Amino acid sequence: MKYINFLIKSLFFCVIFQNVAADSFQTHESIVTAIDNVLINELTEEGREITVKVGKLDPRLRLKECTVPLTVTLPSSSSKIGNVVVKVSCKGKPSWSIYVQNQVEQFGSIMVAKRNLPRGEIIAQDDIELQRVSLGSVRGGYITKMENIVGWVVKKNISMGKTVHPNSIRRQLWVKKGDIVVIIAKNESFEVKMSGIAKSSGAKGDTVKIVNQSSKKVVEGVVIGPGVVQVPM
């Protein structure tokens, strides 16, 4: 009889032990790995690199082990640099979700001045260079391609080694209000040139108004060169 009681108690404790063992929890390492992978895959852009520091999880956090791969999403309002908050969810059984704050630093090459550039200076290729920086530390925007600003005019003084911000430069005006310009009207068969007076200013590609000096009519054309405007036939 004692032997039977011993067997019953042994079986009882064995069942209890198996239930406890079966009640496993999601490891913190698996959550950190899932966040790290998603942030690197989604936030890395061409020509740039990022470093990710996943936020610390509370050691007391005990979440039931997910039966499917974890889902990591970036809320639309979340920043993509600096403090980046993600939502980690288990969409299996049992379902749960948590929010984790992480630190993301993004590096890229941007245009800086190789020398002091005073207001009114026309930017040449030798005036600027690419420099690799942490983009999160740049304020006021930046420019990544040299060809986008060569020939532009400095609007605000730029010191040597400083970032060339979009609001510190402007396109060079090829036509200024009051200038005498060449008006070109052409198609595949012929081309006509005449003179006119600009009624507005514009850079390359801008549409400006011109007074045809012969007909005195006001026409609109596209600036295609210094002092040259093309009008449709």
Image: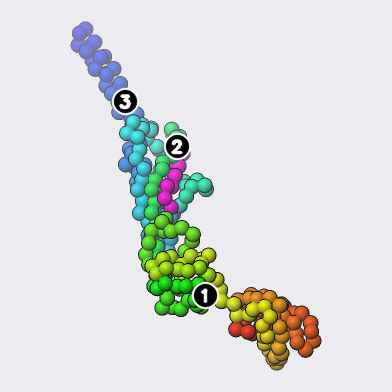
First reached walking from the N terminus: tag 1 or tag 2: 2
**Residue span colored magenta:** 81-91
Task: Judge whether 100 appears above or below 37 on screen.
Answer: above
Locate residue 50, reporting x and y percent.
37, 56
- The residue sitting at 79% across, 82% down in the picture is 217
Give, as a three-letter code, the residue at label 2.
Answer: Ser
Q: Quadrant of the C terminus?
A: bottom right
Which numbered circle lies on residue 97? 2
- Disc 2 vs disc 3: Cβ atoms closer than 8 Å? no
**Mark sitting earlier along the chain (2/3):** 3
Specify whether 11 is left or right of 91.
left
- Label 1 sits on what residue type? Gly
Location of residue 59 (image quadrant): top left
State the residue position of label 1. Answer: 120
Tag in front: 3 or 1: 1
Foreground: disc 1 or disc 2: 1
**Residue that sits furthest to the left in the current view:** 3
Q: Secondary structure at mark 1?
A: loop
